[in-house]
């Protein structure tokens, strides 16, 4: 990894890196050595980088590791917090992380003055409106702490455990999945869900309502330039949804 970073810096003058690996921090010995090498080779002086992490791996006893990551050039960590409901989070993460651990991760990373981005999901089979609102409450509680966040609908992708749990109709085509991505094509998402036997267990009406409310909040903590970057894809692909989202934002801001 360090050799690749070194090569890209030397040959292409690359100054920033994003490591797409949601368990990059799992092997603490490995990530510590990675950071030490960035420092030994003086690469940390010319680059910045960000990565994904797991909330249950961020504890006070590992504070020195995250300080080392920051010293080595890491400016941002991203976490799949998924849900503010203990029951739903336990289902999605196989009880490997709790809501309180998610909160601890946020508190520690912000104490180090590093950027933090959170990812959430709603619309899990069996999830009640009250449980979705718990996710909204968690985001509201950390609205001034999270640098950015995104919310999507719980999606059983082919090959995942959810794919098996959701009783897949074999008539689901690859084309349907290609049309579904990205998330804001809600009509295509509905088509996908209708191909699953557990469709009746998904409160789509509540999910859609709360998704709009939460996405309207995502503009609040962002600097202006990021707000523009966030708006442009919606403007291009789904301007109607953007108008609804902005309306929700203004409604909540001035209520």
Image: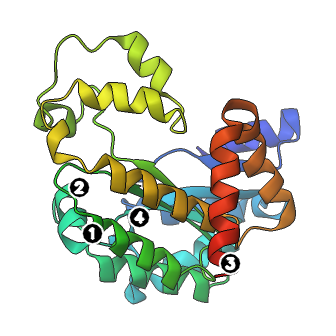
Asked if marks 4 and 2 touch (Cβ < 8 Å), the reply is no
Mark 3 lies on residue: 253
Q: Is residue 233 left or right of residue 50?
A: right
Q: Which mark is residue 226?
A: none
Regarding mark 1 in the picture, which secondary structure is present there? helix
Residue 2 in sight from this viewpoint: no
Mark 4 lies on residue: 29
> As displayed, is residue 1 above or below residue 79?
above
Q: CA distance from mark 4 to mark 1?
A: 37 Å
Please, which colouring scheme is shown? rainbow
Residue 253 in sight from this viewpoint: yes
Using the rendered view, name the quadrant where residue 162 is placed: top left
Mark 4 or 2, nearer chain start: 4
Mark 2 lies on residue: 92
Regarding mark 4 in the picture, which secondary structure is present there? helix
> As displayed, is residue 97 above or below residue 173?
below
Mark 1 lies on residue: 131
Q: CA distance from mark 3 to mark 2?
A: 32 Å
């Amino acid at each position: 990894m360090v050799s690749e970073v070194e090569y890209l810096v030397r040959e292409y003058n690359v100054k920033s890196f994003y490591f797409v690996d949601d368990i990059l921090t799992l092997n603490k010995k490995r990530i510590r050595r990675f950071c030490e090498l960035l420092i030994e080779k003086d690469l940390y002086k010319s680059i910045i980088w960000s990565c994904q992490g797991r909330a249950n791996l961020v504890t006070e006893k590992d504070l020195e590791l995250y300080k080392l990551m920051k010293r080595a050039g890491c400016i941002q960590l991203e976490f799949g917090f998924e849900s503010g409901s203990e029951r739903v989070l336990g289902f999605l993460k196989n009880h490997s992380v709790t809501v309180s651990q998610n909160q601890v991760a946020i508190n520690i990373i912000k104490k180090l003055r590093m950027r933090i981005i959170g990812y959430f999901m709603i619309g899990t089979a069996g999830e009640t409106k009250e449980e979705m609102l718990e996710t909204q409450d968690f985001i509201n509680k950390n609205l001034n702490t999270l640098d950015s966040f995104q919310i999507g609908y719980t999606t059983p992708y082919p090959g995942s455990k959810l794919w098996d749990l959701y009783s897949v109709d074999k008539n689901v085509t690859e084309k349907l999945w290609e049309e579904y991505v990205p998330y804001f094509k809600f009509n295509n998402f509905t088509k996908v869900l209708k191909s699953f036997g557990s469709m009746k267990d998904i409160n789509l009406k509540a999910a859609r309502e709360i998704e709009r409310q939460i996405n309207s909040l995502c503009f609040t903590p962002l600097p202006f330039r990021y707000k523009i970057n966030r708006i442009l894809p919606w403007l291009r692909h789904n301007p109607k949804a953007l108008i609804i989202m902005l309306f929700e934002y203004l409604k909540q801001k001035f209520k």
